[in-house]
């Protein structure tokens, strides 16, 4: 049964009244945020631990019907806009414009930031290390294709710290200036994206040439460029890239693994205080003797510290020498984590604490 126009007008009046209240409340929040900035007297504007606590509290207070993920996104943007009243954060990311790295940066920091495109992962690290930008976002692992080797190598030597993580679901899309999938005669994309969509491509575009390029955004740019000379090229990239390069979205969510997710790390030059639900990332090495790995991990079990990730990689310092990348639950200042780290340092030949930071809430 349809509602009468009068009832609909009444509902809209209620929405308008609520909107007016929300605007006043958000403005009041912004004024208080400005007061906090004055009290801090030029201290860091972005406090990862505090923002993580706010987002967790928002989820705890939420009784629906809006999903908590949607409410957290709204609050991320509110905090981003309030931060910008004090200072506009500069965040480096792996470019060009339209990459998943840029999407991850905006997802984490909100839209009120200055994003700076970098040609490669090395440049993102350098921007943070030299203070050109306050923060950087780099991919570290993908749930389908594993670790990003270059990021791991640079973490070994960088003075930068890890101050956050971003779990970004990867939604691959096929795009082109062509309006029909059957017109496409070649496809550009990053090597990993081509691999993530290989079954879909085999079913839907068998025999079409696949060309690996440095990024998905570059793939979208090339597809748009080729259209100008009459070539019906396609690209596998994000929906954002299709919008930027004005390509037609011909198919969405074409990745073979529906839960495909890329994890990004946020780089900074300062440590992060405990948020109440944190992770600590470490790089370790040990002597090549029987039982060495067991001895290295034993302090975690002894102190009831959970390990969430362990990855080995050649140390590049000698033949058959390896370093181990480890993520554990908890902050380095937590009592049980601190005890475990002291014991690990006694047993390991090398330990580097990359940083403790808020563990990302489920989105």
Image (cartoon, rainbow, N blue to C red):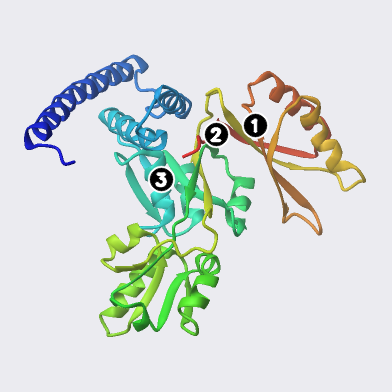
Residue 321 versus residue 219 in the image, above or below: above
Is residue 186 among what the camera can see? yes
Q: Which mark is residue 329?
A: 1
Q: Mark 1 or mark 3, which has the lower sequence index?
A: 3
Side of 48 relative to 324 (left or right): left
Q: How many marks?
A: 3
Distance in Å between CA atoms under marks 1 and 3: 23 Å
- Residue toward you, 224 or 7: 7
Q: Is residue 231 above or below residue 32?
A: below
* 46 to 192, vertically: above or below: above
Q: Which residue is mark 2?
A: 359
Where residue 95 sits: x, y (%)?
40, 57
* Location of residue 165 in the rendering, given as x and y in whole percent from the top left corner: 52, 40
Residue at the image point whose x is 13% and y is 32% from the top: 12
Where's the N terminus, which quadrant? top left
Disc 1 is placed on an element classified as strand
Circle 3 packing at 10 Å, graded few (<14), some (14-19), many (20+), is many
Secondary structure at badge 3 equals: helix
- Secondary element type, mark 2: loop
| Point 7% across, 37% down: residue | 5
Image quadrant in which you'd find residue 282: top right
The tag earlier along the polypeptide, 3 or 2, is: 3
Q: Which residue is mark 3?
A: 105
Q: Residue at x 34, y 39 (%)?
A: 110
Classed neighbour count for the residue bearing mark 1: other residues with Cα under 10 Å, few (<14), some (14–19), many (≥20):
many
Distance between the alpha carbons at the discs numbered 2 and 1: 8 Å
Furthest-right residue in this view: 290
User: Between 291 and 151, which is closer to the camera in this rendering?
Assistant: 291
Work out whether mark 2 precedes mark 1 in sequence or the reverse, and give the earlier one: 1
Q: Is residue 47 left or right of residue 319?
A: left
CB atoms of marks 2 and 1 within 8 Å: yes
Q: Position of residue 203 (x, y in %)?
A: 50, 77
């Amino acid at each position: 049964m349809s509602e009468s126009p009068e009832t609909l007008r009444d509902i809209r009046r209620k929405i308008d009244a609520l909107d007016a209240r929300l605007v006043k409340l958000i403005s009041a929040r912004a004024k208080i945020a400005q007061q906090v900035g004055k009290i801090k007297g030029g201290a860091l504007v972005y406090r990862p631990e505090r923002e993580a606590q706010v987002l967790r509290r928002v989820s705890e207070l939420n009784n629906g019907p809006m999903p908590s993920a949607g409410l957290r996104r709204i609050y991320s943007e509110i905090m981003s806009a309030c931060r910008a009243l004090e200072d506009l954060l500069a965040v480096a990311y792996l470019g060009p414009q339209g990459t998943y790295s840029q999407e991850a940066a905006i997802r984490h920091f909100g839209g009120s930031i200055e994003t700076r495109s970098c040609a490669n992962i090395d440049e993102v690290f350098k921007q943070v290390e030299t203070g050109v930008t306050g923060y950087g976002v780099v991919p570290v692992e993908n749930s389908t294709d594993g670790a990003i080797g270059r990021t791991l190598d640079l973490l070994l030597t960088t003075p930068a710290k890890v101050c956050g993580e971003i779990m970004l679901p990867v939604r691959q899309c096929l795009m082109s200036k062509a309006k029909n999938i059957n017109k496409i005669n070649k496809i550009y994309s990053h090597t990993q994206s081509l691999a993530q969509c290989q079954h879909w491509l085999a079913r839907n575009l068998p025999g079409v040439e696949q060309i690996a390029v440095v990024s998905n955004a570059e793939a979208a740019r090339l597809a748009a460029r080729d259209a100008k000379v009459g070539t019906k090229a396609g690209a596998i990239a994000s929906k954002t890239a299709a919008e930027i390069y004005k390509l037609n979205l011909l198919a969405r969510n074409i990745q073979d693994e529906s839960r495909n997710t890329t994890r990004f790390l946020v780089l900074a030059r300062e440590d992060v205080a405990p948020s109440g639900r944190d992770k600590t990332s470490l790089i370790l090495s040990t002597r090549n003797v029987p039982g060495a790995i067991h001895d290295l991990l034993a302090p975690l079990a002894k102190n009831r510290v959970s390990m969430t990730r362990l990855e080995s990689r050649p140390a590049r310092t000698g033949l058959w020498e390896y370093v181990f990348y480890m993520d554990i639950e908890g902050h380095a200042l937590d009592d049980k984590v601190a005890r475990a780290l002291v014991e690990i340092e006694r047993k390991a030949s090398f330990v580097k604490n990359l940083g403790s930071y808020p563990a990302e809430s489920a989105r």
